């Protein structure tokens, strides 16, 4: 564990990592800060299956899926992928409602920013360990339509971010759970449409988020803040 953590730390330093801010650049290179999650409590290296080798049937299918998504993507899908580069829980406003805003939810905003940082901490260690090249590095035919991240591909940080938020949001507002999870799935798939991730990266991001959130949902400190944020969210949405 110590060796892996040192490798992850070296990887972060090489990338010129900076303190957390809630945007896409943060997930690409910002130093994760521990708020609720003890880094030793989540070891994605031993939970995730390794990504498929490039020359394996699964690896070739992964690349083919990226190229097919690139070939068939529409202007509307491209626009959505570009907009969802922003890492903010408030990207879920399209399913949560117009009152789901930072101004209405200051405590929840902080909770989800802390969740993102804890999630990113686990993801960075896995990215450093698996060190999978991005699709556009592996094949020059791949043409991204969003900023090309400088870090490794597996697991997808954007997918992990969206699913980590979705799980907590659905727990807060089960009335909207189906729409919330559909939105998270779309958020992740857009990374394939944008040609910056393979489908297996996205699935690994979903698994990673589930592992992280399961730990947090058994943490007393997190659950105390969750209760306050839940009340704030439900009040803003007019739910009781």
Image (cartoon, rainbow, N blue to C red):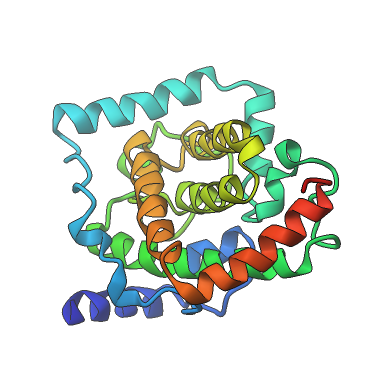
Q: In the rendered image, which quarter is residue 79 located in?
A: top right
For residue 212, side relative to residue 17 (left or right): left
Residue at image coords 51%, 35%: 185
Vertical placement of 108 versus 70: above or below? Answer: below
What is the residue that sits farthest to the front in this orientation?
A: 240
For residue 225, side relative to residue 45 (left or right): right
For residue 195, side relative to residue 224 (left or right): left
Q: Point out the image quarter for the N terminus.
A: bottom left
Residue at image coords 58%, 72%: 224
Q: In front here: 29 or 180?
A: 180
* Total numbered badges shown on the rendered structure: 0
Vertical placement of 44 versus 91: above or below? Answer: below
Q: In front here: 117 or 155?
A: 117
Residue at image coords 53%, 68%: 223
Residue 55 spot, x, y in % from top left = 15, 34
Residue 125 visible in the displayed image:
yes
Vertical placement of 58 versus 224: above or below? Answer: above
Residue 32 visible in the displayed image:
no
């Amino acid at each position: 564990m110590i060796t892996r953590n040192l490798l992850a730390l070296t990887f972060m330093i090489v990338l010129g990592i900076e303190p957390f801010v809630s945007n896409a650049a943060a997930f690409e290179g910002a130093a994760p800060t521990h708020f609720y999650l003890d880094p030793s409590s989540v070891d994605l290296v031993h939970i995730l299956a390794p990504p498929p080798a490039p020359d394996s049937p699964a690896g070739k299918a992964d690349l083919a899926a990226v190229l097919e998504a690139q070939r068939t993507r529409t202007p509307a899908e491209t626009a959505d992928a570009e907009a969802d580069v922003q890492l903010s829980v408030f990207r879920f406003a399209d399913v949560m409602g117009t009152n789901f805003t930072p101004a209405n939810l200051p405590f929840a905003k902080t909770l989800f920013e802390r969740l993102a940082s804890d999630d990113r901490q686990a993801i960075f260690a896995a990215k450093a360990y698996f060190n999978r090249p991005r699709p556009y590095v592996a094949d020059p035919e791949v043409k991204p339509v969003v900023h090309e991240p400088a870090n490794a591909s597996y697991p997808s940080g954007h997918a992990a971010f969206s699913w980590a938020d979705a799980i907590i949001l659905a727990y807060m507002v089960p009335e909207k759970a189906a729409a919330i999870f559909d939105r998270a799935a779309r958020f992740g798939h857009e990374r394939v449409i944008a040609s910056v991730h393979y489908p297996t990266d996205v699935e690994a991001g979903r698994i990673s988020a589930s592992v992280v959130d399961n730990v947090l949902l058994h943490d007393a400190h997190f659950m105390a803040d969750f209760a306050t944020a839940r009340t704030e969210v439900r009040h803003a949405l007019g739910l009781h």
